[in-house]
Amino acid sequence: MSKYNSVRTKLFDWDGLKTKVAQWESEGKKIVFTNGCFDILHKGHVDYLAKAADLGDILVLGLNTDESVSRLKGPHRPIQDEQSRMLIMASLSFVDAVVLFNEPTPLKLIELVQPNVLVKGSDYNIEQIVGYDVVKAKGGEVKTIDFLLGYSTSAIEKKIKVS
């Protein structure tokens, strides 16, 4: 299989992801879930996602659709379209699955995946992370990861505008 095709095999719709998660569970894999916009991939994203992947065997990434990014970040975002962002995220060796979600929160997606570990940035209080109750009810873990200071898409965007 070509490298391009192997990257594309990590792109899922919800039904395909449900089937793949069932396969991973039957293999005894520990599934980690995180989500975000990941508009411009930067060092902070790579650090965060690699650390999230280290918490289990499989990293599933819920990616905000273009519409939901605009709702969250404003009409000037996203900078890159969802298909580009999906392919870029799937090209990371430690990301095993990328799936889009359009809802205000990833709760329905978390309910579908039923991860063993739910991860968000440390700017969140663990008990306030969307899906906390779903994962804890299953006996799973909810973890936070510190961000690298100085790395954000908003900071990059501001730097570009000043140039």
Image (cartoon, rainbow, N blue to C red):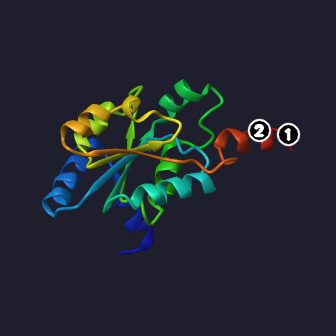
Residue placed under numbered mark 2 in the picture: 158
Determine the secondary structure under disc 1.
helix
Disc number placed over residue 130 in the picture, else none: none
Q: Which residue: 59% across, 36% down?
A: 78
Query: What distance separates the C-alpha of mark 1 from that of mark 2?
Result: 6 Å
Horizontal side, residue 17 vs residue 163: left or right: left
| SS at badge 2 | helix
Q: Amino acid at mark 1?
A: Val
Residue 1, percent across and down? 35, 75
Instruction: Report the residue at 68% width, 38% height from top.
Output: 154
Residue 6, given in percent of the width and then of the height, sits at 38, 67
Q: Are marks 1 and 2 in contact (CB under 8 Å)?
A: yes
Q: In percent of the image, x 54 and y 48: which residue is there?
A: 146
* Total number of numbered discs in the rendering: 2
Q: What crowding class fits label 2: few (fewer than 14 Cα within 10 Å), some (14-19), or many (20 or more)?
A: few
Residue 46's spot in the image, x, y percent?
Answer: 55, 57
Q: Amino acid at mark 2?
A: Lys
149 shown above or below 55: above
Q: Quadrant of the C terminus?
A: top right
x then y, percent, for residue 85: 52, 48
Mark 1 crowdedness (10 Å alpha carbons): few <14, some 14-19, many ≥20: few
State the residue lying farthest toward the right: 163
Work out which residue is located at the far left of the displayed protein and give it: 26
Q: Return the mark for residue 162.
A: 1
7, above or below 139, in the image: below
